[in-house]
Amino acid sequence: MLDKRQPIRGEIVQPEDDDYLDEYEEYTLEDRSSGPIHPLSAMVTIALDFFWTIPDLVATPTVVGLLGTAFAIFLINAFAVFLIQYFVERDYLSSALAKGFAMGIVAGVPYPLTGTIVGGAFLLPHVKRQLLGSGK
């Protein structure tokens, strides 16, 4: 004979007591104190900025090549940040698109200065929180 609490194929079983759920707080988008950009988005921006340093330097003599590499890194970084913000951070679609677009512009600036500074600025509070243990 089957136990009442064991599910039968295709049946959804609710727990008899849900007291264990009281210790968990409900997570909402408004409760986040992690900053505007997910740390993975900041790391992707910094990494792509560094990985595209050599193509930027090679394309410097030709302005068209430099514009091409800047546009390519813009597209790659904007898409990566959008995916991270939408699926990992669970931002709204419009917010994730805007953040992806903004970080794409930052990474698309030729040479690895702008993306590193902005990505590092967004990453610094997360690193501080992890090292010092402050916050959630």
Image (cartoon, grey):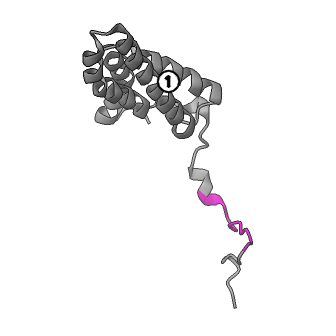
Q: Residues within 10 Å of mark 1 (few under 14, many from 20)?
A: few
- Residue 26 location in percent, x, y? 61, 43
Nearer the observer, 30 or 115 = 115
Looking at the picture, tell me which residue is in the foreground, 111 or 95: 111
- Observer able to see residue 112: no
Q: Where is residue 64 in the image (x, y as percent from the top left)?
A: 38, 11
Secondary element under disc 1, as helix, strand or loop, is: loop
Q: Quadrant of the N terminus?
A: bottom right
Q: Is residue 7 visible?
A: yes
Residue at 61% x, 52% y: name it. 22
Extreme residue toward the bottom, this view: 1
Residue at x 35% of width, y 13% of height:
66
On the picture, is 95 further left or further right than 130?
Answer: right
Residue 74 vertical position relative to residue 126 in the rendered view, above or below: above
In magenta segment, residue 107 = no
- Residue at 59% in and 31% down: 91
- Residue pushed farthest right? 11
- Residue labelled with disc 1: 36
Vertical relation: 76 (above or below) 4: above
Q: In which quarter of the image is residue 70?
A: top left
- Asked if residue 65 lies left or right of residue 103, the reply is left
Residue 16 is one of the magenta-drawn residues: yes
At x 67% / y 65%, what residue is drawn?
17
- What amino acid is at disc 1? Pro
Question: Dividing the image into 4 quarters, which one contains the C terminus?
Answer: top left
Asked where in the image residue 92 lies, by quadrant, the reply is top right
Residue 121, image x, y percentages: 36, 19
What span is colored magenta in the figure?
10-20
Q: In this view, does 43 lie to the left or right of 94?
A: left
Closest to the observer: 24 or 68? 68
Q: Kindly report the secondary structure that dominates the magenta region of the rendered protein.
A: loop
